[in-house]
Image (cartoon, helix red, strand yellow):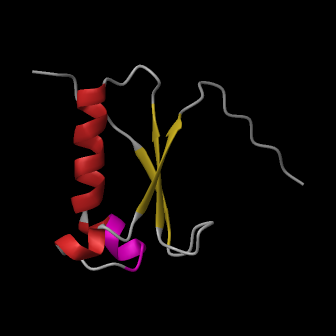
Amino acid sequence: MADQVVAQVRVSKFGPAGRPVAEVHVNSAITAQQLGAVLQNVTTNEKVLKAAGLRACGGCKSGLDLNILDNFQDIIEVKA
């Protein structure tokens, strides 16, 4: 059995293209098979779809843009 992969998902109803978007943050060591499983779970997760303003139906999932980003090991928060 493959190791379980956890991804951070940030969702917005209005992304850069004006459509709902989900940013999927994963480790760079993820395999194609693991990434496929993560994306399948993201596009069928009711909480993600609801946060994006979509219903959990097959046709609605096609309206969700996915951006896949690499997690960085060192995250530095800078406050104004």
Residue 60 x, y percent position in the rendering: 28, 75
Residue 39 x, y percent position in the rendering: 30, 47
Residue 6 versus residue 70: which sits nearer the camera? 70
| Residue appearing at x 35%, y 65% in the figure | 48
Residue 74 versus residue 23: which sits nearer the camera? 23
Is residue 67 toward the left or the right of residue 48 in the image?
right
- 1 lies above or below 57: above
Characterize the magenta stretch by its predominant secondary structure: helix
| Residue appearing at x 84%, y 50% in the figure | 79
Residue 42 x, y percent position in the rendering: 30, 54
- 50 lies above or below 6: below
- 64 lies above or below 2: below
Q: Is residue 3 visible?
A: yes
Q: Please report the bounds of the magenta region as a residue range.
A: 48-53
Is residue 66 toward the left or the right of residue 41 in the image?
right
Which residue lies most toward the right here? 80
Residue 2 versus residue 65: which sits nearer the camera? 65
